[in-house]
Structure formats: structure tokens, C-alpha cells
């Protein structure tokens, strides 16, 4: 029985102003996962369902040769590493060594900590690239990228995209990847792959390994006694909690194995309360449990207590289950391009899991301090503590201006989502639940362009690739 977090979300859902739907077919319950939960890693073009845990798939796309390579548990090195920065630096140096002398390599530089740090290892021989949108809200992201490129001395390339072509780019991206994207900037990466480069380095996965912003509050919570935390929580009115940035942290007193707990809530891209209203509590809990179970099977049995345990599990849920890796990789494959993910490698995961959770994500309120300190030592001019966006497009405005509505009008709402779409028919409700409305739109595109397309065929490439499908077994 799920208590605490689920009770809170159930109460919150009652404030959304939507009626409970009686249409809860088994098909609609399954399809709600496409709205609420990320899909995990994998490739749409490969005909593998799943490898055994702790194995890699080595495939030559377009041919029949397939092989499996095991990862020995004795090589995982799950022990406290007192010299984590040295380990991270050595690993990044090794990742960059082979890329510096390869032709056609470019680093996707956002100007943030992760991509800038990677570029310090790639060096001036590897150019940088940023895909931009002519949105006023995205102007700061362009400035960050150009400023970082100037400090690094890299040859920078800008790929410009227009808001007026955004809807068409969404359709093209869904066709190319065969998957509905959760992130709006997937359309920018789609256009970046149009350039002449062959291998694109991305820093995806760094947050999952070394810290999201949510980790900043952990030391503060630890300084409070449990009775004090409980007293504060009881004094906060319910209507205030949803506005509190870390409201769920007050609910993290339960087990980290609770599918309704704070740790299990990472990498969600919708409003759980709204989804529960229309697809049922059981469907939501089952999907949350499957993701959590998938993650826990790949972690050491010993999980830290309290908030550090929730953060530990939550970060790994994001790392293992967030599906941007798969979607961007498929976008590259559709053009015979390669996506290089240094933070998605076994060595990166081994280094992270070897650092205790209470020292891995934040220190004195500084999130991702390990990567920040390393970058400061390599590029002193860079302000590692500056506030920066998340390279995202203005979803709320895109909903308000009708860009997302254009997709829904063009493709229609799938039958299973009709009742949910009706609840979001007012502009106010669509803006309030912008992410869910965006998910409905991309799901509608995917249903017509991919699911119902009898002529769709996989894109076949003619060169060998090797990448983790079930990402490594991080167990004893």
C-alpha cells in the first residue's frame, strides 16, 4: 500500500478541475505510459527486445552478425574513491583520445558545465556546434554557447531553426526516430544531424551521474531532525505544497522502494495526478513500479538511508530509464550519423557508483560540484557557479501561441486519449498542463506517422556499431 507521496498526489489531482473518466480500457492503460513515463534505453531499428542483465549488444546494422559481451562483476570497483576528480579526469581523457584524431567529429556545445568540460578534453582540433531557435527565450542559451566557445578557442558552428518551421520539424523527428520525444529540443538535434559531421559528442547523462538541482537541498534536510521536518510539513497547507520547489522532499521519509516515493518520481514528463484521473491508479502505480524495479536490479543491494537514498535511486532511475539517449541515437542512425555519449559509458557509471551517494551529487549546496571543480581547474575563466537554463525551448509559450495545437489539429487525438484531451480543451488548462498537452500532440503524430504507417521500414546503415542496451549491471 502506497502512503505519503501517493496520498499527496491524489489530493493534488482533485484540485486540477477534471472529472474522472470511466473509460479505462486495458489498451488505454498501457498507452498512458507513453504520456507519463520515459521508455528506457534501446534502439528502434534493432530487433532486440532485451539482453540479459550486465551484457552489451554488438551489432553490425544491416547484417545478421550479432554478439554479446559480458561485464564481469569483479571489474565494477564499487568502493569509495578518495580521488574521484582524478578518476573522472582520467576517464574523460581516455574517452577523448580516440576522438581528437578522428575526422568528422563535433561536440554539441550548450555552454553548460558538462559540454564545456568535455570540450576541454577534446581540444581545439574538434569543432563545436549548437542548434538554435529564433525564440527570444532561447537567446541566453546562444550567448552561453558562444561565450564558452570563445573561452575554449573552438571553431563554433550555429545551426539556426525557425519557430515557423518547428511543427514540421517535430513531424520529421518523429518519422526519423520512430519514437515520440519528451523534450522539445529534440527538434534542434534533428536539424543538427543535417550537417556534414559524422560523429556528434553529447554530454547527456551527466546530471544522472553527478547531480540534478534537487540534490542541493539534501544537506539542509539532513541538518533537521525528523520531528522538526514533520512539524514543518504539517504546518504547510496543501495548496502551498505544489508550489514549493522541493515539496516532494518532505514526503521522502518512506522507503526508497516505494513506487510512489520521491526517488521513483525522477524522469517523469507529465502530471501524475491528471494521468491517474484518466487511466486509473493501478496503471500508474504499475508503470512506476516497473521503472523502479528495473533500476534497483542494477544497483548495489545497499542503498543509503533517508533523503540520500531517494536521491541515489532517483538519479539512477533517470540514468537508466530516461529515453533521450535512444531517441537522439535513432535520429543519428537515420542519417548514418553516430551519437557519442561519454557519460553513457560503463566506465562513467562505474566511477559514479564508486562514490558514496552523500558525496556524489552535492557539497555545501553546490550541485554537481565534482564536475564544476574539475572544469574550474581546467578553464579558470569559466564561472562554474553561474545560473544557466536547461537548453529547453519555451513550452508554455508554444502552447499559448498555438504551435502545439497545430500538431493536434493536423493529426487528431487518438481515440484512447479523447477524454483526456477534452479535459484540456481550454487554453488555461492546456497551459497549466503544458507537458501533458505536448505529450498528447507527439503521441498523435507518432500514431499516424509510425504506428499506422504500413510502409515504414527501418533505416539500415553499413558500418559496425556497439552500444549498451541494458546499460551495465551495477551490482556486487
Image: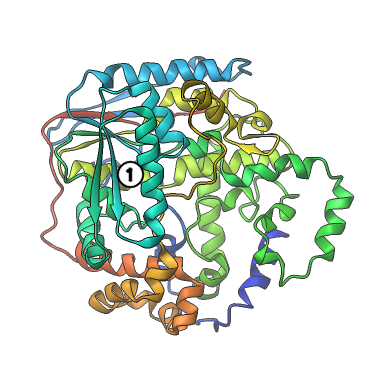
Task: Specify whether 419 is left or right of 106.
Answer: right
* Number of on-image labels: 1
Image quadrant containing the N terminus: bottom right
Name the quadrant containing residue 235.
Answer: bottom right
Tell me: 64 left or right of 137. Answer: left
Check the image and report above or below for 47 versus 381: below
Residue 83 coordinates in the image, percent (x, y): 59, 15
Label 1 sits on residue: 326
Residue at left offset 33%, top offset 44% = 326
Seen at 62% across and 47% down, the residue is 214
| Element carrying mark 1 | helix
Asked which quadrant contains residue 272, the reply is bottom right
User: Can you say whether 316 is above or below 135 in the image?
Assistant: above
Give neighbour class at mark 1: few <14, some 14-19, many 20+ (Cα, 10 Å): many
Percent coordinates x, y for residue 215 in the rendering: 64, 42
On the image, the x and y values in percent for residue 296 come to 56, 39
Q: Residue at x 64, y 66 (%)?
A: 9
Color scheme of the displayed model: rainbow
Nearest the eye: 51 or 176: 176
Q: What percent of the width, then of the height, locates residue 447?
A: 26, 67
Identify whether 391 is placed above or below 417. above
Question: Visible in this render: residue 216?
Answer: yes
> Quick one: quadrant of the C terminus?
top right
Residue sitting nearer the eye, 126 or 314? 126
Whether residue 2 can be seen here: no
Q: Is residue 220 left or right of residue 191?
A: right
Tell me which corner region of the image, top left, top right, bottom left or bottom right, holds residue 19.
bottom right
Amino acid at each position: 500500500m502506497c502512503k505519503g507521496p501517493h496520498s499527496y498526489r491524489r489530493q493534488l489531482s482533485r484540485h486540477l478541475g477534471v472529472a474522472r473518466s470511466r473509460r479505462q480500457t486495458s489498451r488505454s492503460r498501457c498507452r498512458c505510459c507513453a504520456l507519463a513515463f520515459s521508455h528506457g534505453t534501446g534502439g528502434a531499428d534493432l530487433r532486440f527486445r532485451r539482453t540479459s542483465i550486465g551484457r552489451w549488444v554488438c551489432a553490425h546494422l544491416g547484417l545478421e552478425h550479432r554478439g554479446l559481451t559480458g561485464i564481469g562483476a569483479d571489474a565494477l570497483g564499487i568502493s569509495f574513491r578518495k580521488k574521484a576528480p582524478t578518476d573522472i579526469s582520467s576517464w574523460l581523457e581516455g574517452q577523448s583520445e580516440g576522438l581528437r584524431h578522428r575526422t568528422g567529429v563535433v561536440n554539441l556545445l550548450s555552454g553548460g558545465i558538462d559540454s564545456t568540460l568535455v570540450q576541454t578534453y577534446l581540444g581545439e582540433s574538434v569543432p563545436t556546434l549548437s542548434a538554435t531557435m529564433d525564440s527570444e527565450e532561447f537567446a541566453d542559451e546562444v550567448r552561453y554557447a558562444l561565450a564558452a566557445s570563445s573561452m575554449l578557442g573552438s571553431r563554433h558552428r550555429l545551426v539556426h531553426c525557425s519557430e515557423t518551421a518547428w511543427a514540421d520539424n517535430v513531424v520529421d523527428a518523429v518519422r526519423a526516430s520512430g519514437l515520440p520525444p519528451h523534450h522539445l529540443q529534440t527538434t534542434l538535434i534533428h536539424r543538427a544531424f543535417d550537417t556534414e559531421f559524422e560523429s556528434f559528442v553529447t554530454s547527456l547523462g551527466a546530471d544522472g551521474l553527478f547531480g540534478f538541482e534537487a540534490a542541493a537541498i539534501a544537506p539542509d534536510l539532513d541538518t533537521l531532525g525528523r520531528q522538526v521536518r514533520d512539524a514543518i510539513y504539517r504546518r504547510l497547507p496543501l495548496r502551498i505544497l505544489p508550489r514549493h520547489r522541493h515539496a516532494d522532499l518532505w514526503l521522502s521519509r518512506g522507503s526508497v522502494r516505494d513506487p510512489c516515493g520521491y526517488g521513483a518520481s525522477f524522469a517523469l514528463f507529465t502530471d501524475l495526478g491528471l494521468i491517474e484521473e484518466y487511466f486509473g491508479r493501478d496503471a500508474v502505480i504499475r508503470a512506476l513500479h516497473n521503472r523502479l524495479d528495473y533500476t534497483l536490479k542494477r544497483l548495489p543491494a545497499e542503498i543509503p538511508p533517508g533523503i540520500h537514498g531517494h536521491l541515489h535511486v532517483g538519479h539512477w532511475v533517470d540514468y537508466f530509464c530516461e529515453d533521450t539517449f535512444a531517441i537522439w541515437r535513432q535520429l543519428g542512425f537515420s542519417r548514418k550519423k553516430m551519437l557519442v555519449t561519454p557519460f553513457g559509458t560503463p566506465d562513467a557509471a562505474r566511477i559514479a557508483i564508486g562514490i558514496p551517494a552523500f558525496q556524489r551529487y552535492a557539497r555545501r549546496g553546490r550541485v554537481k560540484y565534482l564536475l564544476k571543480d574539475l572544469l574550474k581547474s581546467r578553464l579558470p575563466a569559466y564561472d562554474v557557479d553561474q545560473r544557466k537554463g536547461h537548453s529547453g525551448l519555451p513550452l508554455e509559450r508554444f502552447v499559448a501561441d498555438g504551435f502545439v495545437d497545430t500538431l493536434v489539429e493536423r493529426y487528431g487525438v487518438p481515440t484512447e486519449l479523447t477524454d483526456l484531451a477534452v479535459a484540456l480543451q481550454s487554453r488555461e488548462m492546456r497551459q497549466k498542463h503544458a507537458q501533458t498537452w505536448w505529450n498528447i500532440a507527439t503521441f498523435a503524430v507518432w500514431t499516424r506517422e509510425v504506428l499506422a504507417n504500413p510502409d515504414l521500414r527501418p533505416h539500415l546503415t553499413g558500418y559496425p556499431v556497439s552500444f549498451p542496451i541494458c546499460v551495465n549491471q551495477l551490482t556486487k
